[in-house]
Image: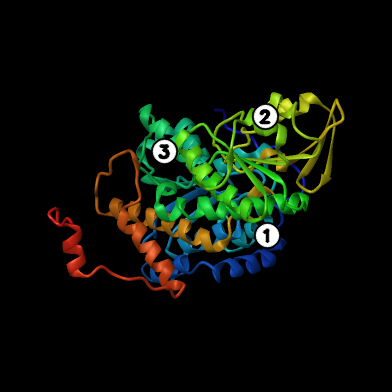
Amino acid sequence: MNIPEKKATGNFSEVAGQYCVRDITLAEEGRLLLDWAESRMPVLMGLREKYSKTKPFAGYKIAGCLHVTKETGVLIRTLAAAGAEVLWSGCNPLSTNDAVAAALAAEGIKMYAWHNNKEDFYWCIDRTIDAQPHLTLDDGCDLIDTVHERFADLAKNHIVGGSEETTTGVHRLRARAKAGKLYYPVYAVNDAETKWDFDNVYGTGQSSLDGIIRATSVLLAGKNFVTASHGHCGSGLANRAKAMGCNTIITEVSAIAALKGWLNGHEVMPMDQAAKVGDIFCTATGVKDVIVKRHFEVMKDGAIVCNTGHYDAEINIPDLASLSKSKRTIRPNCEEYTLKDGRRIYLIAEGRLVNLAAAEGHPSEVMDMSFANQFMAHLSLVERHKSGEKMPIEVMDIPADQDELVARTKLEMMGLHIDALTEEQKRYMNDYNAGT
Ligand code: ADE
């Protein structure tokens, strides 16, 4: 990995060592978005209220590499209110909201992110590393990878710990740990139940459909909707598409996930078959080359193709381009590829995360729990560091009591109440002798 140079020229708002955003005058617009998100993220706001008094992060620098959305802004403000110096870059070139980035930069966050920063993606990450952070907060592992590959000394001798937000990132992290190349402990926030059972399922389901609708405005009812994968994200999406009146099809490589999909009422078939009948395709697998040349070759005229997995490798776009005689942008975030045989295929958001590139990502209500987990993971890292504990260098699960606390707080904030086991019921549950 070579140290990247900034390539983009043109109009930016830039203060060396402070921020580089598209346009700082968008800050007021961004503040309104942040206010809106804050009103829907009570768990995180409760943490802000509590820890802005004690400032547990004072003296710690946190570098984050995660979609710059209004919800992320609420997390950033909360970390800063709890005493952290926060440096940030976006984890996808198309997901940064420039108004939110401007608002945060204007508040003193060291923000290096702008929409469509493809060529400067790693330049932005590098700027957050310049400040020698103590903690890293990732979505997809690009920051952790950069630190480990190019700043190994910092990773081994300075950074206290990190966290990872997404399934793909946790896979990469576990592969790194297995290879003996992980240099500091990292919490797998993705794997908390109050993250993946909600954010991945309900968040991805709604926001991906939102992106498809914003980019195409097509009627969903009656369409053959193909979801590649029936994991947390894919199942959420397929179920939401079904609720909108789609005929849902899932493709899978896992027999168990395929069975679950079938019992959820979706048709199950290989992509080779689904390619011929689908009207809308959305990949959610975390692996590459899910839709390739032979699939494009048999798709219907007018098929819409998109991806909601972390990386843009799931749809083989060079394959699509090689079959095409022309390409034009027909609507924002929607490119029409005309194939040599005259069929048209529509690709949303260049095959990048449809929910963040063509819409606003998951709704605030669901990110509330994910980001409460992020905040608490970092609090735990800092508290363990301050106590002098030598943490094991591994991928760590979020403790069950944290998960429970996040869920309970969320319920409480929504005014919902649940039952509690009586002492007698607890005894009964633990009695190996209680039978018929
Ligand atoms: N990932 C999915 N949705 C998101 C959002 N709204 N903010 C940050 N990261 C996200």
Crowding near pointer 1: few (<14 within 10 Å), some, many (20+)?
Answer: many
Tell me the crowding category of disc 3: few under 14, some 14 to 19, or many 20 or more residues within 10 angstroms, Cα based: some
3D distance between C-alphas at marks 3 and 2: 36 Å
The picture places residue 205, in percent across and down from the top left corner, at 58, 52
Q: Residue furthest bottom?
A: 415
Q: Residue at the location (35% across, 63% down)?
A: 405
Q: Position of residue 353 (x, y in %)?
A: 63, 44
Label 2 is placed on what type of residue? Asn
The answer to whether residue 241 is above or below residue 28 is: above
Secondary structure, mark 1, is helix
Q: Secondary structure at mark 2?
A: loop
**Closer to the camera: disc 2 or disc 1?**
2
Q: Which residue is mark 3?
A: 154
109 or 332, nearer to the observer? 332
Quarter location, residue 373: bottom left
The single residue placed furthest to the left in the displayed view is 433
Label 2 near label 3: C-beta < 8 Å?
no
The disc labelled 1 sits on which kind of residue? Ala
Q: Secondary structure at mark 3?
A: helix
**Relative to 290, is 47 on the left or the right?**
left
Q: Earlier in the sequence, mark 3 or mark 2?
A: 3
Residue topped by disc 1: 99
Q: Which residue is mark 2?
A: 316
Q: Amino acid at mark 3?
A: Leu
